[in-house]
Image (spheres, rainbow, N blue to C red):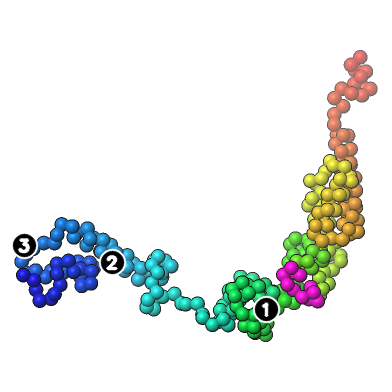
Amino acid sequence: MTSDSGWGPRDWSSNGAGGTWTESLSDTAAAPEPTAEPEAAAVRQTTRRSRRAERSDGPERSGIDDTRGAGAAPEAPSDPASRARDICLRMLTGSARTRRQLADALRRKEIPDEVAEAVLDRLEEVGLVDDAAYARSWVEQRQRNRGLARRALAGELRAKGVDSALVAQAVADVDPDDEEAAARRLVERKLRSTQGLDRQVRIRRLAGMLARRGYPEGLALRVVRSMVDESMVDEFMVDEAEAESWPDAGFGSDHGEDAG
């Protein structure tokens, strides 16, 4: 006969700790049905998984979408202003951004324009958005690392939404001598790959490379012609020196006389 607890022999899921059977029969001969053991094993396995999930760092590691209790992931802010701030701060964490870039991102997230403008104004007030500083930093890095000329730098900044006046101020800081030195470094790196080609072909290829980096035609041709001519003279001198060092290999008047 059953006990007064009201739990039957298969009530393990809610009362038995760790998925064990709750013994409620006084008759020791009573046993669960043969098909119950696989079910009990499945419950124990599920319980162990649940305990491991509780000890883990949260739903992302445990693979369980637990939206209940203190371990639940924080919900996204519901008001547009908070959402806009979160979007901007996440974007600014990795690198600086222009106001236009942030505004475009907020528009894609369907933030109302008036809310976006207010948030961006506040970010500018606290110095987190500064298009002038962004333009100066961009020019310095791209001119140093890529050897870009002022025209190419200005085009990149305008594409990122920087105001034309700020663009002009930023590229004006590029010294003409530094720009020419950068052009010479670019040509020097490519000069060897054109060795052996016709002079005009070399000039056309190297000048085109500088033009793609924003260098004006006059500067590009002047630098390229000078460096190509210097290179050809050096190459000619090397060829002459190599020719003089070759053995006569049986040629010449002395050798001819010996042979006779």
Residue type at mark 3: give it: Ala
Name the one closer to the observer, 126 or 5.
5
Residue at the disc numbered 1: 129
Chain-order first, disc 2 or disc 3: 3
Residue lying at the far top of the rendered structure = 260
Residue type at mark 2: give it: Thr
Residue at the disc numbered 3: 29
Residue numbers of the magenta segment: 157-167
Q: Main secondary structure of the magenta part?
A: helix
Question: Is residue 96 in view?
Answer: no
Residue at the disc numbered 2: 47
Residue drawn at x 80%, y 59% is 213
Residue 209 percent location from the top left of the image: 81, 54
Residue 73 percent location from the top left of the image: 44, 74
Chain-order first, disc 2 or disc 1: 2
Residue 134 percent location from the top left of the image: 72, 74
Residue 133 percent location from the top left of the image: 73, 76
Quarter of the rendering containing residue 4: bottom left
Residue type at mark 1: give it: Val
